[in-house]
Image (spheres, helix red, strand yellow):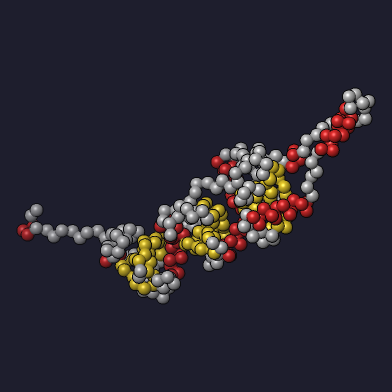
Amino acid sequence: MKFRIAAALIALAVSATAVAPVAAQTSGPDDPRENATRPAEGGRVGRTRDRNRDRAPQPTAEQIQAAAQEQATLGNTGCQVTEAKLLGTTAEKTSVYEVACAAGPGYMIESKTPPLVTDCVVLANSAATMRASNPEADVGPQCSIPSNMDTQRFLREYAEQAAVPCNVDEVRVAGKSNDDAIVYEVGCAAEQGYWIKKVAGAWNKTECIQVIAERAECTFTTPAEIAASVKTWLAGSEAAGCDVTEARLMGQNSNGRFYEAKCAAGDGFIARLNAEKAVQQIYPCATAQQIGGGCTLTPAPAPAPAPAPAGGRP
């Protein structure tokens, strides 16, 4: 599996200035003097009443929730809307809603055809990324319903749904993969983390040792945590005594995956493991030059000195 992460997640194609708030969507005088009773100077009072009569009525909370539920359904979100806000309309006369869901994160939805849907976790991550580069950045509309703002709770739920087998201590949005899925990085306590993503309704996870081998980044995982994970895989094998200080994934073939390990003392080795992480074979670095180019973490032994010429002279 190859990983290609988008540099930024531009989550919603509307900006803060592009959405007119609901309160600004009606027209009519706000000056109370306009509604005062005056002599009929050309019917001024009558004109004011006509303007008030033409003012569009505001939708009720029930109407907003029903309209938002319709958009959430059309957007295939699977969201059962429990709360909704109508944030305003765009110049294209589309409506922008924020919705909270009975399960999972809420969404920002623009009533295009089909609806433009972005979950609140991605929006919050995009805003944080932009503000890290420019504290004054215009990050656009953001989710503000209280249940939508605890993004770490949702991220940890994703890690649980993906069956990440560790004590999760950090989670973040990593970006978008080349198959258009949102990728999340999961950090683990005292061992390597994972990248997870959901494709066609199913979660898959990839260990950080593989992510790094494919030239991507796990910001929550240290080399020591990768080494600790590899150490656990060696239990019960002839290499179990190695205090692994560094490790890398070299590649795989039909026989299994090949990992190089460097030991705190003694020679390193290349280990071949099957899909269940059981060790199948150990190749000492001294004799493993033909496996994927050989060891790179363990220094090669110095070549033996050339024998002195006969007669003791050069």
Instruction: State how many labels appear.
Output: 0
Q: Residue at x 43, y 63 (%)?
A: 227
| Residue 244 on image: x %, y % | 41, 64
Residue 72 image point, x, y percent: 66, 55
Q: Eyeballing the image, is 295 above or below 233?
A: above
In the image shown, does 91 or 280 lie closer to the viewer?
Answer: 91
**Where is residue 312, by image quadrant?**
bottom left
Residue 124 visible from this viewpoint: no
Residue at the left extreme of this rendering: 311
Seen at 45% across and 69% down, the residue is 232
Percent across and percent down for residue 210 are 43, 60
Q: In which quadrant of the rendered view does residue 53 lie? A: top right
Relative height, residue 38 to residue 9 (above, below): above
Residue 200 found in image quarter: bottom right
Left or right of 29, for residue 129:
left
Q: Is residue 5 visible?
A: yes
Pick the residue in front: 215 or 120.
120
Q: Residue at x 76, y 40 (%)?
A: 23
Can you give x and y, in whole percent of width and height, for residue 46 in the image?
89, 31
